[in-house]
Image (cartoon, rainbow, N blue to C red):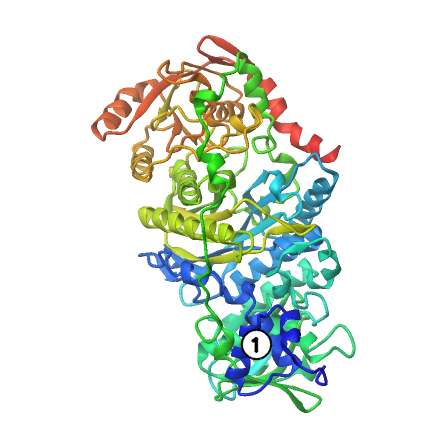
Amino acid sequence: MSEVQITVETAKNLGLTADEFDQIKEIMGRTPNFTELSIFSVMWSEHCSYKNSIHWLKTLPREGSRLLVGAGEENAGLVDIGDGLGCAFKIESHNHPSAIEPYQGAATGVGGIHRDIFTMGARPIAALNSLRFGNPDLKHTKRLIKGVVSGIGDYGNCFGVPTVGGEAYFDECYNQNILVNAMSVGIVKAGETVSATSEGPGNPVFIVGSATGKDGIHGATFASADLTEDSAEDLPAVQVGDPFQEKLLLEATLEAIQTGAIVGMQDMGAAGITCSTSEMSAKGGTGMRIDLDKVPTRQKNMQPFEILLSESQERMLIVAHKGQEHLLLEVFDKWDLECEQIGEVTDTGRLEFYKDGELIADVEAEPLVLGGGAPVYQREYKKPAYLKKVNAFKIGKIKQPEDLVAAAKTIFTSPNILSKRWIYEQYDSMVRTNSIHTNEASDAALVRVKGSEKVLAVTTDCNSSYVYADPYKGAMIAVSEAARNIVCSGGEPVAITNCLNFGNPYNPEVYWQFVHAIKGMGEACRKFNTPVTGGNVSFYNQTVLENTAEPVFPTPTIGMLGVLDNISQRTSIRFKNEGDAIYMLGTPQNDIGSSEYVKRVHKVRYSPAPSFDLDEEFHIQHNMKLIIKKGFVESAHDVSEGGLFVSLVESAMAADLGFVVETDYNFRKDAYLFGESQSRIVITVKPENEDDLVNYLNSHNVSFTKLGEVKGQNAIIDDKDFGPITEWCKLYDNKLGEIIEN
């Protein structure tokens, strides 16, 4: 490769533009060789540099009273949860690899996000995911679902971290380009964190974990381009994972931290050795001299650029204190893992890579990284044309169904409503015994913090149909629903991580979606005081078929962390006692926009996002936290997909109890039952606490409605019998598995 003539075409083939090629030549003062150009190509890819998104990402709130490590500072965000403990958490995408090779793509997504957590010194205690698939009736989609779920389950189960929550949505826009977002949550004691930095010229640099192979080469570039009919030919760009090796690496890493021999450490994720050496050096204001001959490899005669760009999994880069190398070697030898010194820290600010005694690449570290010399762009954006169809929607043109029971069943059997039991039963949710038992489900997943009274509440949320209809409002709703889920579980929202899944940023309409989603997200995060601790931008989520690009719905997934000071604060969705009164907090609306009802029953693709007011949402949630603490609430469940009807039935199914409720004649009955207007929560209260609850709500100006009571075994609405709860259970529990398996 050293003999390859480097031209602008070479740069374009590596994913760089002509202008970027000129910029690289100016930085280097010469034309780079192929290896050097390959280094720039991965470090300046969208996946590594965020060149098309960083301007807007910097507008998100990044400060909070609990924040210990903010966005971009380390491998993951870190927040103070009290008792001398920190919680590290992050969500990232593995979309393109999963679309091409679903099992390994999803598995290595799980492995990579866990490494981000334990690289900081935190032990992962919980995993979540957010998945998007196409039409589940399609054979192609069934194959992708099975592969992704197996990959997530097998890796997580073998690694020994419970998968405690997540979400899965289905829409035809994801038929080819699925989304696989993985989240990890870990706990670390104060003073035991490790930074991803390189300091101290002369300090040795080690590569630890697995040997380096040819899998994942140019994976970062692969993630920064459109999926096409030919993308399957890029299969080597998909990494291959080994959860057992990762488990050894986890234990060895945490033990090595205790020796005090580690200066800094970073996971080898996107761009492998290239990324870890450049980012650690730039952060520490140092350089590195690396001998690629010393890197353990799985294949013979690997080219220098292959070693540098490989994204083989289960590897870390460690800078150790000189003179303490033996402490590191002893730990990794004990765990039977590779631990090879491949270089040392220098004071030059340069990355010097040698092979066979020859200097094959010599580049400055700083220009490679975000905030150094990597390009930053603000793309053109314009309002999408399809929004004219959204705004043309008139609820008056939608005829109310004569048979509400039939409509309810149509909604209830939507893949987006049905139980995801077929998926989550393939995940071990109880390993390490931190998880709160799932038979008493809450709106958020709850995880004990051992050695403490505290409980973590974690969730992933985003309704991409809402964001498609209104990116600004839809992103605000995503943050608000995540917070609502945590509040309904008894927790206090603390911070978020995000995974921003969009189409091609060079498409002005896609970029408009991105910009407005960022604005909405930022406004909601500021309202709830939930700073953004980091995450991932995933552009190019679209499929190009016959020269036509079809972007996925904009999907800014929110991973939110909340804290319960004590398990006694826990609140679940299950109705508790026959005779309990059922109330709805919040204001109902004559609104069916972007609901499962309007999409499934009336086959309407374009309609506005649901009604939403951020101030009302905050007011409802603030008071919801207080009435839980006062002991008024027996159960709580937010109103989301499927509307009030689905919320009531889900709480009833969890208890094997029925309900008798009345709707408000001032509203369309279909909107009242099936509309998805926001800022509503269904709660139950014991009869003896009703007066106290009502007095509190009235005195604090909280909108509420008494719906009815928990009663019998059937769903009764306005004296109409919607049938036994057991029948709704049968529809809910088994249908999705039947669709996927048949």
Q: Quadrant of residue 577?
A: top left
Q: Residue furthest bottom?
A: 357
Q: How many marks?
A: 1
Identify which residue is drawn at 55% across, 24% down.
602
Q: Is residue 346 above or below residue 277?
A: below
Identify the residue under disc 1: 21
Residue placed most toward the observer, 644 or 395: 395
Tell me the kind of residue under disc 1. Answer: Phe
The quadrant where residue 40 appears: bottom right
Q: Residue at x 46, y 81 (%)?
A: 199
Query: Is any atom of residue 144 visible in this view?
Result: yes
Expressed as whole percent of the image width and height from the top left, the position of residue 620 reads 32, 34
Q: Residue at x 58, y 55 (%)?
A: 540
User: Dot 1: few (<14), some (14–19), or many (≥20) neighbours within 10 Å?
Assistant: many
Q: Is residue 259 visible?
A: no
Name the residue at 30% across, 22% down. 689
Height in image: 61 above or below 130?
below
Depth check: give the residue in front, 454 or 482. Answer: 482
Of 499 and 188, nearer the camera is 499
Q: Nearer the viewer, residue 56 or 742?
A: 56
Give coordinates of residue 336: x percent, y percent. 68, 70
Position of residue 310 relative to residue 233, above or below, is below
Residue 413 in percent (x, y) is at 60, 26
Residue reaching furthest top?
719
Q: Quadrant of the N terminus?
A: bottom right
Secondary element type, mark 1: helix
